[in-house]
Amino acid sequence: MREKPDDIDQPKPKSQREIEREARLKLALKANMGRRKAQARARTAADSDAADDNNKNE
């Protein structure tokens, strides 16, 4: 049976480049989610306005 080297079980320390990349990705994801939520709110508001207009015309 082969023994496991000690370094396999422990995660590698991240380089500064990896840390910066993760930070950029995190900010981009947060901005993207904000845009998508704003779009969803606008879509919901437009749908409810259209429904109100249809009810007024009847």
Image (tube, rainbow, N blue to C red):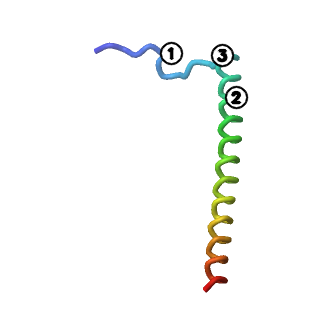
Is residue 18 placed above or below 42 in the rendered structure? above
Viewer-proximal residue among 56 and 15: 56
Tell us which disc is closer to us: 3 or 1. Answer: 3
Secondary structure state at the residue bearing disc 1: helix
The answer to whether the residues at label 3 and label 2 have Cβ atoms under 8 Å apart is no
Q: Earlier in the sequence, mark 2 or mark 1?
A: 1
Q: Position of residue 44 (x, y in %)?
A: 64, 64
> Quick one: quadrant of the N terminus?
top left
Residue 55 to residue 21: above or below:
below
- Quarter location, residue 28: top right
Residue 56 location in percent, x, y? Answer: 67, 83
Task: Answer with mark 3 or mark 1, whichever residue precedes in sequence.
Answer: 1
Up-down: is 57 above or below 20? below
Name the residue at the bottom extreme: 58
Q: Which residue is identified by label 2?
A: 24
Res 7 label: 1
Helix, strand or loop for disc 3: loop
Mark linked to residue 15: 3
* Residue type of the residue flagged with mark 1: Asp
For this orientation, the residue located farthest to the left is: 1
Q: Which amino acid is tagged 3?
A: Ser
Label 3 environment density (alpha carbons within 10 Å; few <14, some 14–19, many ≥20): few
